């Protein structure tokens, strides 16, 4: 199988492995050589081996409303997406910078609101955000850090620039697939790893558990605080990940009903030994379901009194409730200003240019250029409720024009990015498919970033939608040390 | 261990055992009816009674035909008395405790459930019933084998084993109960076919061989009952199940109340007199055994599953 000028159709997009002349990029030379030495049949056989391994290892994700058969095997393409180590070093610095600033920002919003008083970010954007929780005002979690686990989506544009597309500060998922993708590729292509120095990702569960320990209430037993992962349950689309992380950290996976908050404002676990104290909850349920006493009274997933226990400082929640305020896509457009405000630095990784529909001038531009733009609701995730202008019908354009006029605060627009591509096995040939990248950043008493992250790939030709719930696949992501 | 997880593993044990026993009972009953003349008056409805589903069946309004009854006991997807329901619940519980159990257990129970959904309908209509039920029993044993062979003997194992022991003791008492019911109703005819009946009872718990080897070659009603109640070496006797349940409880924290409840069941297991076998007495005894096993279940639930709110 030749990944060369003749066989790998050159496109106008930036390819992560192959340059515009059809030659392998330097960091990917050996990788490309390796796959070039394989016949199509062998590639297909290896892909089957990957698929089988995934089924055997039970790596699955859940799609809603498919009746009884709700687990689907996780789709992983055999060709890794590779980036050079020195480029990654810069991105890593940029992510650390970004998450530090975002956490200072959230802490400020719930306390002094300096940045609003200084009019760097308009107060009405925050006060109209449904992710800004009054229940969190006047509180500061341990180390002043709210978003302990952040998944920021990165994309590379046509000129090779890497942008942050969005920050996921609520309950970002995907890290278990990053870990399992590496495990599977290692099993199926062991020899590849002998020729490359690929930065490891397997330490993530240890780093996560260390971070969760570091944010436990100060009064908790320092050596071994009780940590649990709180899941909405087996029918949640990310249940595999919840159970995976609990297992690899060696902590209990619990549901709301397993926890109880006592009259002493402490959180306890219902166990066969009786009620036992819990110090840190890595919660994978949304804010509004956390505590029926404070938020949605009909929530069956949460724990009555949990906010009480959190505010009393008796239990830590990761991420802290209310972190999602910085997850808003309108707030996103201010992140470069936020970084400058708190850190007096320029953003190392740029934002994608963003028009805020709340701004009348921006809105006019968006309405005029709609067929060229991507429009996103401010608060959705998973690729839902968005419009990809160039791929939409004129009827859909009209629908969105109406939506934008009706509720401008809730929308932003961005140019349709020429997302970079990576060779992907499609049927019997390797074809360019668009990818993004979600690294995971942990912040407790210190900050850590995964080497690479989860690369998601839009398997349909020309598609820019990479979400697994909407037919996306994934790739192992390699950060290759220079000189290998 | 989480109370919720403990509860699920316990119910996995119960439902797996219930599924296996339902298959055993239906299979042996089908064989028995081939041997007994119709005038013995042993009908298919006894099967519904044996699993304690009389009211549910009457409520369904179905007639007492072989196909309807077996459909109800094997393949009914809605009702809670069917084999397929027991497997669905076992699967559901394993699915929710996958982190605690060997991976193969989930795969096997999932396969078994999917297979049962396909095959139990035809089995109710007596297409390959014997083979399908044999396979089902074998598959249940395979899962039990996986669990006992690879699950470390910590709390999850003890809860699984406890659920299994309680369910098995309960099912054995029901099997004895039904056998005595025939005697009660048809003393003269059953005297003639009694041996066949008791052989069948033993076979339904795979106990025919062990009874003959370790008890005695002749199949006599009171001895069979005594064997199934009190033999401490036969794995499906009530006494054996109680010993098992007791050691499971002893390995768990705060087990005093369950021990007391088990003592009460034990107290019921008095020798069965040879000279005079009163069907009514045996039947009352079995009712009491079932009631006391229910108390054991309540004690288990109160001790480990339901914790009061507040610290």
Image: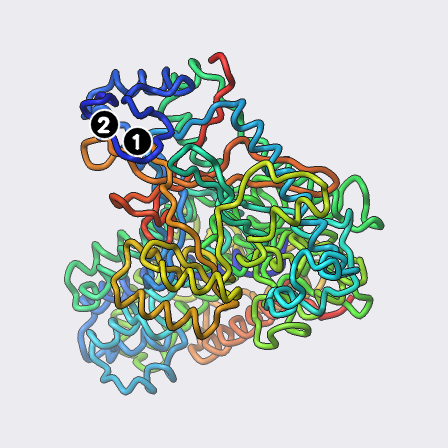
Tell me the quarter of the picture where residue A451 sits: top right
Indicate the position of residue A89 as horizontal and vertical percent values: 57, 27
* Disc 2 element: loop
* Disc 1 element: strand
* Dots 2 and 1 on the same chain: yes
Dot label at residue A183: none
Q: Is residue A483 left or right of residue A148?
A: left
Q: Which residue is mark 1?
A: A423
Q: Nearer the viewer, mark 2 or mark 1?
A: 2
Q: Is residue A277 left or right of residue B80?
A: right
Measured along the vertical axis of the image, is residue A446 above or below residue B290? above
**Mark 2 near mark 1, Cβ–Cβ under 8 Å?**
yes
Indicate the position of residue B20 as horizontal and vertical percent values: 37, 58
Residue toward you, B281 or A368: A368
Measured along the vertical axis of the image, is residue A117 above or below residue A22? below
How packed is label 1: few (under 14 Cα within 10 Å), some, or many (20 or more)? many
Q: Which residue is mark 2?
A: A8
The residue at the point 57 percent across, 62 percent down is A286
Image quarter of the C terminus of chain B: bottom right
């Amino acid at each position: 199988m030749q990944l060369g000028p003749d066989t790998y159709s050159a496109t106008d997009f930036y390819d992560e492995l192959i340059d515009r002349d059809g030659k392998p990029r330097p960091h990917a030379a050996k990788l490309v050589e390796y796959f070039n030495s394989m016949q199509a049949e062998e590639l297909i056989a290896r892909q089957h081996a990957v698929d089988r391994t995934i089924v055997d290892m039970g790596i699955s994700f859940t799609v809603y409303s498919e009746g009884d058969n709700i687990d689907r095997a996780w789709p992983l393409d055999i060709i890794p997406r590779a980036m050079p180590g020195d480029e990654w070093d810069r991105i890593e610095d940029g992510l650390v910078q970004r998450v530090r600033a975002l956490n200072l920002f959230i802490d400020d919003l719930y306390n002094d609101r300096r940045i609003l008083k200084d009019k760097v970010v308009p107060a009405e954007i925050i006060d109209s955000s449904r992710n800004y929780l009054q229940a969190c005002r006047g509180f500061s979690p341990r180390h002043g850090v709210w978003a302990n686990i952040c998944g920021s989506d990165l994309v590379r544009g046509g000129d090779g620039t890497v942008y942050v597309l969005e920050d996921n500060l609520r309950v970002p998922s995907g890290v278990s697939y990053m870990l399992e993708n590496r495990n599977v590729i290692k099993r199926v292509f062991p020899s590849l790893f002998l020729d490359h120095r690929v930065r490891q990702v397997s330490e993530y569960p240890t780093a996560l558990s260390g971070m969760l320990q570091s944010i436990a209430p100060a009064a908790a037993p320092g050596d071994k605080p009780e940590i649990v992962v709180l899941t909405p349950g087996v029918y949640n689309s990310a249940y595999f990940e919840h159970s995976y992380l609990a297992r690899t950290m060696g902590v209990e996976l619990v549901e709301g009903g397993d926890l109880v908050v006592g009259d002493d404002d402490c959180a306890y676990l219902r166990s066969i030994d009786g009620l036992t104290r819990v110090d840190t909850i890595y919660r994978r349920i949304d804010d509004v379901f956390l505590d029926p006493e404070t938020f949605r009274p009909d929530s069956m997933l949460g724990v009555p009194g949990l906010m009480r226990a959190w505010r009393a400082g008796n239990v830590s929640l990761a991420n802290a409730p209310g972190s999602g305020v910085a997850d808003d896509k309108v707030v996103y457009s201010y992140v470069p200003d936020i970084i400058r405000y708190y850190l007096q630095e320029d953003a190392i990784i740029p934002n994608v240019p963003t028009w805020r529909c709340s701004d009348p001038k921006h809105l006019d531009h968006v309405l005029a250029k709609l067929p060229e733009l991507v429009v996103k609701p401010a608060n959705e995730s998973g690729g839902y409720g968005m419009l990809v202008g160039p791929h939409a019908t004129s009827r859909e354009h009209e629908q969105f024009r109406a939506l934008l006029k009706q509720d401008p605060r809730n929308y932003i627009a961005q140019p349709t990015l020429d997302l970079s591509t990576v060779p992907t096995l499609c049927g019997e040939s390797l074809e360019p498919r668009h990818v993004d990248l979600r690294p995971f950043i942990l912040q407790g008493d210190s900050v850590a970033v995964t080497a690479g992250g989860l690369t998601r790939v839009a398997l349909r030709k020309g598609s820019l939608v990479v979400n697994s719930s909407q037919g996306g696949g994934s790739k192992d992501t390699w950060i290759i040390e220079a000189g290998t | 261990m989480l109370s919720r997880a403990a509860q699920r593993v316990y119910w996995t044990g119960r439902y797996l055992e219930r599924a296996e026993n339902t298959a055993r009972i239906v299979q042996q009953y089908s064989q028995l009816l081939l041997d007994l003349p119709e005038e013995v008056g042993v009908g298919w409805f006894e099967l519904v009674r044996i699993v304690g589903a009389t009211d549910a069946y009457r409520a369904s309004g179905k007639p007492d035909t072989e196909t309807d009854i077996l459909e109800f006991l094997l393949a009914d997807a809605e009702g809670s008395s069917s084999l397929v329901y027991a497997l669905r619940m076992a699967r559901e519980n394993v699915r929710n405790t996958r982190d605690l159990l060997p991976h193969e257990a989930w795969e096997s129970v999932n396969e078994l459930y999917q297979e049962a959904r396909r095959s139990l309908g035809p089995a109710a209509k007596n297409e390959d019933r014997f083979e399908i039920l044999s396979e089902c029993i074998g598959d249940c044993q395979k899962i039990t084998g996986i669990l006992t062979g690879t699950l470390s003997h910590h709390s999850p194992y003890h809860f699984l084993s406890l659920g299994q022991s309680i369910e098995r003791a309960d099912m054995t008492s029901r099997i004895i109960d039904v056998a005595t019911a025939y005697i009660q109703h048809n003393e003269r005819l059953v005297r003639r076919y009694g041996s066949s009946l008791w052989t069948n009872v033993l076979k339904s718990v795979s106990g025919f061989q062990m009874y003959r080897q370790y008890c005695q070659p002749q199949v006599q009603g009171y001895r069979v009952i005594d064997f199934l109640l009190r033999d401490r070496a036969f794995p499906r006797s009530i006494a054996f199940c109680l010993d098992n349940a007791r050691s499971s409880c002893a390995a768990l924290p705060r087990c005093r109340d369950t021990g007391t409840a088990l003592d009460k069941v034990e107290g019921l297991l008095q020798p069965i007199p040879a000279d005079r076998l009163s069907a009514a007495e045996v039947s009352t005894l079995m009712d009491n055994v079932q009631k006391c096993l229910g108390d054991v279940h309540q004690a288990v639930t109160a001790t480990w599953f339901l914790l009061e709110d507040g610290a």
